[in-house]
Image: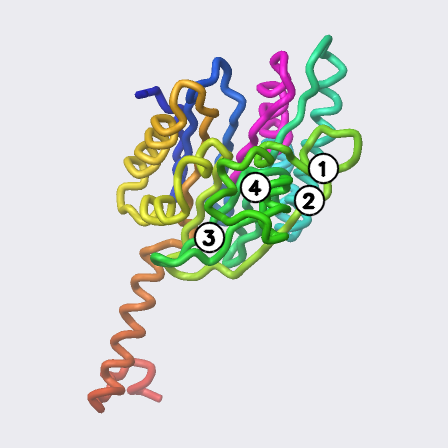
Amino acid sequence: MEQAVDFQAIPRVVAGRARGGRDAQQDEVLCLHDAGQDAFLLVLADGMGGDGAGELASAGVIDAARRLWNEGLWRNQPGPLFLESLCQEAHAELHRRRAGLSGGEPHSTVVAMMVQGDRVSWAHVGDSRLYRFQGARLLGRTEDHSLAQLRLLRGEITEQQLATHPDQHKLLRGLGGPEAPVVEHGCARLRSGQRFALCSDGVWEQLSTEELCRLSRRRDQDAALREALALAVERGGQDGDNVALIFARPVREGWWRRYHERLRSVLRRRATGERAVPTYNEASS
């Protein structure tokens, strides 16, 4: 089932979404980059609520994220604090938008990632996910705030059963509910070769972790992302969910390549006993 893809791209990041088998598109993505500080903000939201509230909710999350970014709060805040503010402001935005609805309840998931220097932070509420990869290895993924994930943690079901379990869509946390959301956070130091995938449940229910890892390693990230979305739409079929996906490689590969070339050169000289050719400063000291 071939579909058009809404596509976004910024340096070292590609993102896209497709409608799948749904009449409306309730998934939203946002990719922002500050070239001066080489900082990134990536946000993915999956709305729900009926009577058009899902589209309104996910758009509200994205609008709140863009507003906070443009205000520049992230320049003076640690990544986790900014992402907490983003989630709480998005929650408040959904409450404001509910006032204009005659029916429906705007709710949304969110998964967001912030890169500042050599630090990456992420936050999520609901069952939209963030995956971290290093080479062919999964470093970790966020844990869904769903009843099915709770059953997995209790050992009642397996990881393989999670995507198709009847309780997968029963969320325990979300934005737009009566209480302020409890946001789950994570952070790490960026390293060479690290890659990230942010996706809605329409993607991870259809694509395995191994497939996401393999596709995220492709040199042509545009083609890889389009293939991933096409696979998710095809496997979801006529009743399939909306799909949204972001692939990110925030580390500057050119800088790391030069660093590793210098490191290999030093190690080679040490192994062979070869003396390094002195620079001008070394020779004159």
Q: From the image, tell me which residue sits under label 3.
A: 132
Q: From the image, tell me which residue sits under label 4.
A: 112
Calculate the distance from the C-alpha at mark 2 to the C-alpha at mark 1: 9 Å
Q: Which residues are magenta?
A: 41-65
Q: From the image, tell me which residue sits under label 2.
A: 183
Kind of residue sitting beneath label 2: Val
Q: Are marks 4 and 2 in contact (CB under 8 Å)?
A: no
Q: Where residue 47 appears, x then y in whole percent?
A: 59, 25
Q: Earlier in the sequence, mark 2 or mark 3?
A: 3
Kind of residue sitting beneath label 4: Ala
| Label 1 packing within 10 angstroms: few (<14), some (14-19), many (20+) | some
Q: Where residue 249 appears, x then y in whole percent?
A: 40, 49
Q: Are marks 2 and 1 in contact (CB under 8 Å)?
A: yes
- Quadrant for the C terminus, please: bottom left
The magenta stretch spans residue 63: yes
Residue positioned 67% across, 22% down in the render: 106
Kind of residue sitting beneath label 3: Arg
